[in-house]
Image: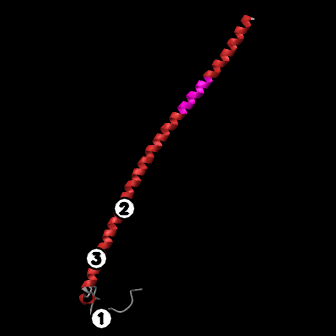
C-alpha cells in the first residue's frame, strides 16, 4: 500500500515557521529556557564525570586492599606453619627428655 491521501494543493507543504505566528517574547523565553537546560545538562555531565572518577579511584583502592589482604593472608599462613613446626619440635624435645629421663633413672637405680 502506498501513503494514501491526496497531494496538497499548491505544491509542497510549508515547513518554515511563520514569523507572524511566534512573538519575539516567546522566542526569547524559549532561548532562555534552552540556556537553562544546557546549564543543567552541563552540571549533570560534570557530576557524572566526578562520579566516574570516584568510582575508578574506589576500584583502584579495592584492588590495592585486596593485594594487601592476600599478602597478609600469606604471612598469616607462614606464621601458622612456623608455629606448627615449632610445636612439633617442642613435642619431639619433650618426648626425647622423657626418654632421656627414663634412661637416667634406670642408670641410677
Residue 82 located within the stretch drawn in magenta: yes
Magenta-colored span = 77-88
Q: Position of residue 6 (x, y in %)?
A: 35, 92
Tell me where residue 14 sits by quadrant. Answer: bottom left
Q: CA distance from mark 1 to mark 3?
A: 38 Å
Residue identifier under label 2: 47
Specify which label sits upstream in the sequence, 3 or 2. Answer: 3
What residue is drawn where x is 64% and y is 22%? 91
Q: Position of residue 19 (x, y in %)?
A: 24, 87
Query: Mark on residue 32?
Result: 3
Specify which label sits upstream in the sequence, 2 or 1. Answer: 1
Q: How many discs appear? A: 3
- Screen quadrant of the C terminus: top right
What residue is drawn where x is 45% and y is 47%? 62
Q: CA distance from mark 3 to mark 2?
A: 23 Å
User: SS class of the residue under badge 1?
Assistant: loop
Whether 12 is drawn above or below 68: the answer is: below
Q: Residues within 10 Å of mark 3 (few under 14, many from 20)?
A: few
Disc 1, disc 3: CB below 8 Å?
no
Dominant SS in magenta: helix
Residue identifier under label 1: 9
Amino acid at each position: 500500500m502506498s501513503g494514501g491521501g491526496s497531494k496538497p494543493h499548491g505544491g509542497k507543504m510549508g515547513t518554515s515557521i511563520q514569523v507572524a505566528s511566534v512573538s519575539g517574547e516567546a522566542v526569547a523565553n524559549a532561548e532562555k529556557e534552552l540556556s537553562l537546560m544546557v546549564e543543567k545538562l552541563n552540571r549533570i555531565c560534570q557530576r557524572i564525570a566526578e562520579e566516574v572518577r570516584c568510582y575508578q579511584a574506589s576500584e583502584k583502592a579495592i584492588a590495592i586492599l585486596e593485594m594487601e589482604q592476600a599478602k597478609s593472608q600469606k604471612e598469616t599462613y607462614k606464621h601458622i606453619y612456623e608455629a606448627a613446626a615449632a610445636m612439633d619440635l617442642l613435642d619431639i624435645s619433650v618426648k626425647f627428655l622423657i626418654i632421656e629421663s627414663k634412661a637416667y633413672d634406670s642408670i641410677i637405680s
